Image: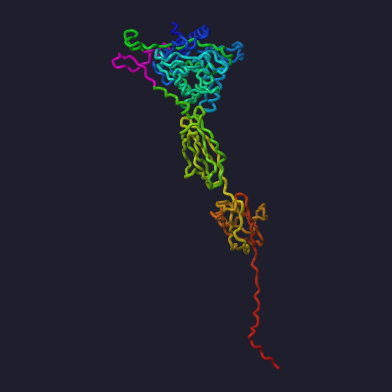
Amino acid sequence: MAAHMRRRLRKGATTTAVAAAAVAALAASQAPAATLADGSAGSGDPKAAGEDTASGETDGAATGNSPYYTDLPPLVTPDKPGSSSNLPAAGSAEAGIPASVLAAYKQAERTVATTDPSCRLPWQLLAAIGKVESGQARGGRVDANGTASPRILGPALNGQGFALIKDTDGGAYDGDAVHDRAVGPMQFIPSTWASWGQDANGDGRKDPNNIYDAALAAGRYLCANDRDLALAADLDQAVLSYNRSTEYLRTVRSWYSYYQRGTHEIPDGTGTLPSTPSTPTPSPSPGTGSGPSATPSPKPSPDKPGGKPSPGPSKPGGGGSTSPTPKPPTPKPTPPSATFGSLENAGTGPLRATAGQEFDERVSVLARNAVGAPLAKVPVTFTVTGGTGTLFAGGKKTVTVRTGADGTATAPKLRAGERAGEFTVTAVAGTVRPRTLTYAATVTARQADAIARTDEKALVAAPGEKFADAVTVKATYKDAAAAGVAVTATMVKDRLGVIDNDKGPYFKDADGKPVRTLTTLTTDADGQLRLPEIFADDNEGTYLLRLTTEGGASVVIELIVKAPEETTPEEPAPDATETPAATKP
């Protein structure tokens, strides 16, 4: 009867009567439980009644599917001390988390938030797993550095009711050179710790018995495979990767919800210890069975306690007996050293260039893995977006570059287009949850610091006529020809160009109408510009034409409108060879 009640409690206390019985049972058993290394927990097995895992397999679980505590939270909603009239000033014992243990969970949450913010790891999930795995490091029995004392060890994973995992660490972590054991507050098996171990307290060691190291390792492990723990499906997959058991998932979920509703800090060593470890289901000996047939009877569905078994496929010749549908194995988490964590700017400076020129700076990014170290061989796609005409070397808008051994990827050089303005370069890496960086860039117009006429000939036209001589100028930048520089030509009344002139010389637009300002002029490859034809109206006088370049250089040219001078023909002089007429006497 007791075993039946315990199973019903672990199924979630589906009725009020059963839930009340669970509270009574938990309240009556508050004595400190033995460590997992002791005999009481050593008889446990992750494969309690109704669990999914096959006997003797780990499915890549972080704990090797080692035993865990199945105690459920009380039904009283936790509050902070003094915040509810229904709780004593000291707060609920179950809602209290030892100070060092709570600090480790919150530190792990902050650390992961900087290296893998898209995971959205909540510290309450670490607390829930820590509660189920070790009773919050046995109620906070840790030293000043956060190391469990004595160390926390699970039973030997020797295949006797547990998974069979032969020694992988030479006993370095678990003191067992024959079989592995789960180690520390978060119960990592040595082979998993070898890949995921962390040094979170900065003592130079990766110690699975240290709550700071273990909490950070657990956080990174749960975030593996680009999980977003704010999504229920990803959170469930993460917990199942820790222990391949639906019963384990339900238990962790219960504590997770409990801690989300409220918790508080209590002194180290004063936490409430769980009392109910999961129990093993020993494998039957060869040739034996329970009852007349060795074929197991179908079990009721775990989601419907007391319900009828779900129909399943019949074995050939098995008299219609059902067999469970095998679940596809959950993929093992990628080790943190190979898991893409973040994409950062690798020191790219301001991106600014003159139209048609190469940018001095190149876009560079840094990829890091889940533990913050540089990650090599990550494909990074760089894309130019905007209307300036800027392209990467080779005339491409998009290029893909893999990060090197130092984790950096540098895009090819950029060549500015001919149109001034803003554009962006976007770097994208990752597939499941891509990381993106965007860089702003600017193309400035070509500039000149000087402009002058190429000759000094006077420019004169008669009223109503056009100027016979064309105006030609040359723009330079640092004494070199400035090609492609925009030039504005304006008829003005003063040399500073403050007042435009509405009479006198003019240009013609495409329709032949008079215009006195042109803004579409550009110097040629030699920096020279030949102005369009200039016409004079009927007003005589001296007028000013001001040319201004991008960059501020300018020149003022005089245009003279006057009527041509009239000339009077002279009488011819007498011919010197003509013989004078004879004079009369």
Coloring applied to the structure: rainbow
Q: Residue 326 location, x and y as percent? A: 37, 19
The residue furthest left is 317
Please give the name of the residue rendered at 51% of the width and 23% of the height, measured from the top-left corner: 198
> Which quadrant does the C terminus fall into?
bottom right
The relative height of residue 35 versus residue 350 in the rendered view (above or below) is above
Q: How many marks?
A: 0
The magenta region covers 298-327
User: In the figure, is residue 315 to the left or right of 231?
Assistant: left
* Rendering quarter of residue 113: top right
Please give the name of the residue rendered at 64% of the width and 67% of the height, measured from the top-left corner: 564
Of 41 and 177, nearer the camera is 177
> Which quadrant does the N terminus fall into?
top left
The residue furthest right is 585
Q: Residue 92 location, x and y as percent? A: 57, 12
* Rendering quarter of residue 315: top left
